[in-house]
Each structure stands twice: as structure tokens, then as C-alpha cells.
Amino acid sequence: MKRRTFVALGAAGLTMAVSGGARAQTAPREDIQTFSRDPVKVAALRLAFEKLGARSPDQLVGWFNYAAIHGVPSNDPIAPTLPVSMRTYWRQCHRDEGQFFIWHRAYLAALERNLQTLSGMTGLRLPYWDWYKDPTLPTIFRGEFLDAARTRRNPLYDPRRDAAVQAGQPVWTPASSGAIDQPGFREFQADLGGSEHGDIHVGVGGWNEQGGLPDMGRVPTAARDPIFWLHHCNIDRLLTAWISRGRAAPDQSAAFDAAGYKFPLEGGADFTPKAAALDMNSRTPLGQAYESLDAPFVAPPPRPVTRPPVTRRVGAGARSMGRGALALNPPTSVAVPAQGLSVEIALPAAGDRRVRDALNAPLARATSVVVVLDNVTLEQSPKGLTGYDVFLNLPGGSTANPAPYKIGAISLFNLTMDHDHEAPMAAPVYRFQVVRQVRARGGLTSSLIVTLVPRYGPRADTAANPPSIRVGDLRVEVSANPVE
Ligand SMILES: [Cu+2]
């Protein structure tokens, strides 16, 4: 081989290595504590957010539209003044809860590209906020001004946050829900989404006098706060940590690609990633490593729970719910006070013919038993309340280790969707499969007790007890169908 040829090949090889290997060479997304120690990166992040914030709301790559991609309140005063064509970008999030992780991954990647362009720092990466490790709002996001003379505004500041959080007090009392120990993707998502994810949203947003949840605390406004991106970067990191434990996410390609999500990029094009490129099952998705995949991999220590009194007793009934499912109680609407409650549901008699006809078997032979909280709506958000943990057959009094009785979690954040005419959304329905717990406790032989125990942030008014959420229909469904 002649030397010239060798050089040419070598050069070609190098080019390939750079373009093909660029993903692997991408700097990792750093913990905000690491990131904050580099003043060049901090300045670049601030510059990019300053430019986004300075743009008028009709700009596709600007603060208003980028937040509206996630959500926009139905009564927003600016939205009606903007070009109709912009609306095709709005409210892309939460169209399908199953795409929670993959959609946010794309959303983060799109913003990250814009931050790189706007800052002029091509290697700029979004940092993540590990709120297990440090529950206080990262320092560079606090403080309205960057100078003592109060002339330079901090682009990472949002005035619509909880005042104590803004002052550096913890957003929450770090507590793993054990999500990362869940082997199933849906259970992992349900635990993380019903607990940590929502608690941080609500904790940062705080509570105003009307009981409303500003910016971070509500789905339609959450992405208006720059800390949103670091919070979701951490959620994305936790998915990667979960994958790195040998777990697998289901293939969401068909639904994701069919939805045709699009994110405007600086320069005029749209970022329209395909599911395959988002690498749900990779430890380095999009070529992005995280500085650390540390997460609470060990189940959290048990925290004692005292069961709220049974304030509602529901008699047995039987109604068909379709597809072979039978509800064991009549429609039951429950207003849940901030301090929680227990509902006791009587079971039909062992020989109940309606049950036998529906199941082709006596009740004890049901293969699926689901506690359903249907049509859940937010009434009020009392100060400090972030959500509820849901238990089945929790003993009365205090239980030192309630873990075996826990069947799920609800976050107030997920109840803050706007139900407007443009993006009609059904109110959330929670389905908790409990057939294993029921069998472990001797089957469907006595009544069932469903308990909602409040989860509070660190500065809660636990004496307040207004109705906080309403469950439109709380029911127990049984069927002879195989458990999904
Ligand atoms: Cu979120």
C-alpha cells in the first residue's frame, strides 16, 4: 500500500470515527453539583435560558412555546393571541401515559440541542438534579439577581416557587418509593410517577393561598420553570439506572412513531425523533452517559403508618364492567380528606349467583382482583400535601412495616391537567392489581379495606383536613381473565 493511499484511508477512518463515535464521545450529563463548579458551563446555561426567556411568545424556539409543548393552561391570557399554527406543537405531553419516559427523553434532547445552539457551546449538556442526594433547590437556580446591585436578573430563577424552597430549604424529605426495585416497567413508572416525580413537582411549585399549585406544581405550567429540565433529566437518569440493572422497557415504537411528536429547533427545522433512536433500553441513550447512575437500589426502610379510621362502609353489589370484569360494589363516590380515610367494601356472599355467572366460578376462584380508583379529581391542595399512598387491608392502629399492604401511590401533580375542549382528557383512573395480596391473606373471604394515607412535604399543615381529592368511583373488580 502506497503511503498516500494509507493517509487518505486514515483520514477517512478518522472522519468516521468522529462522526460515528461522536455519540460515545459526548460529554456525560453531570450532576448539578459538579456542573455548578464550572463557571463556563454555568454561564453558558444562563445565556441560553436568558435568550429563550427574552424571545416574544410567538417564537417557536422561545420560553413560552417550549413550555407549551408540555402544556398550556386553558385560560392562559397569551395563548389566544398567538398564531394558530403554533398550536400544533402544544400539549404533546401526557397524551399517552405509557410514553411518559420516551416522550420526555425526546423533549429534553430537543431543548438540549437548542441550548447548545443558543449558548454557542456545542458540548453543553443538561445537568440533572439528584434530589435523593441533595433535596435543596440547586443554588444557581435560587436568587432573583446575579449581582448585589440587583441589576442582572438570574435567568434560572422563577418567582412562582415555594418561598421556603427558594430560600434553600429542602423540597422534600428524601424517600425512595422503592420504584427502582420494581422489575416491571409499568410498576416502576407507577411508583416513580405516583411518588418521587410528583412530590418534587408539587414541592417546588409550593402552595399559594388559593390552594393552587404554581408553575412546577401543575402539568399545564410545569415546564415554565427552568428547574423542570433538571428534574426530568434526573427522571431520565433513573430510567437509565433501572435499565442498567438488567431491566427492559417495552417496545413503544409503533405508538410513539405514529404520534408524530415534533420539537422546533433553532434554525427552523423540527426535531422529530423516532423511537428506535431514543434507545429506551440503552445504558447510553442517544449516546448520552450520565455522570452517575447512583440511585436508592435498596428498598427504603419501613416507615410506620397509622391507619385512618374507616369512615365509609360500602355494601356488596355486583355490576358488569365489560370484558368479563365484575365490580363487587355499587358505584361509590368518595371525597378524600387531606388526612386520608379508609373505605370498607363488603363482599358478596360465597354463593352469589351473579358472581358465579360472571366468573363461571365462585368468587374465591377469581384470577384477577383490581382495586380501581376511577375518575380521580383534585378538589384542593392543602399546604404540604403531595399525594396519597394506597393500601389494602392495612390493620387498624399503627403498623411498623406497612410495605406488604401498599398497593400504589397517587400524586396530586398528575391530577392537575386542564380538562379543556382542545385537548379532552379523561380524569385519571388508577388500577391496582391485588390478587397476590388477596391470596396471601386467605382470599376473598371477608370485606376489603382500601386506605389512602396522605404523603406530606416537610412544611405541611397536617392539621388541615379539607377534602383534597375525589374518587368518582372506587370499586373492586374481579374477573376470570388472566392477569396482564
Ligand atoms: Cu414531570
Image (spheres, grey):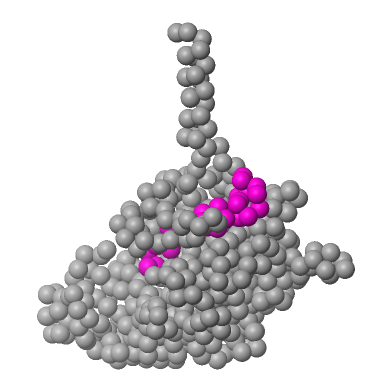
Q: Check the image and report above or below for 465 versus 241.
A: below
Q: Position of residue 195 (x, y in %)?
A: 51, 68
The residue depicted at 42 percent of the width and 56 percent of the height is 272
Q: In the image shown, does 199 or 446 lie closer to the viewer?
A: 199
Image: 469 above or below 301: below
Image quadrant holding the C terminus, namely bottom left
Query: Which of these two is toward me, 229 or 310?
Result: 229
Give the magenta range: 96-125
Q: Which residue ends up furthest to the top in the rendered image?
A: 2
Residue 105 included in the magenta stretch of the image? yes
Answer with left or right where residue 162 lies relative to residue 22. right
Say if the magenta span includes residue 218: no
Residue at x 55%, y 56% (from the top left corner): 266
Residue 329: x and y in percent read 28, 87
Q: In this view of the protein, can residue 222 be seen by the observer?
A: no
Figure quadrant of the N terminus: top left
**Is the residue 61 above or below the residue 454 in the image?**
above
Residue 200 point in image, percent of width and height: 59, 68
Displayed quadrant of residue 448: bottom left
Residue at 21 percent of width and 73 percent of height: 479
Question: What number of labels is visible?
Answer: 0
Magenta stretch secondary structure, dominant: helix
Instruction: Report x, y in % for residue 411.
Output: 50, 74
Instruction: Locate residue 336 relative to residue 251 in the image: left or right.
Output: right
Query: Between residues 470 and 51, which one lies in front from this camera angle?
Result: 51
Whether residue 279 is visible, yes or no, is yes
Q: Is residue 447 above or below residue 16?
A: below
Q: Going 58% across and 61% down the picture, which residue do you hit?
A: 229
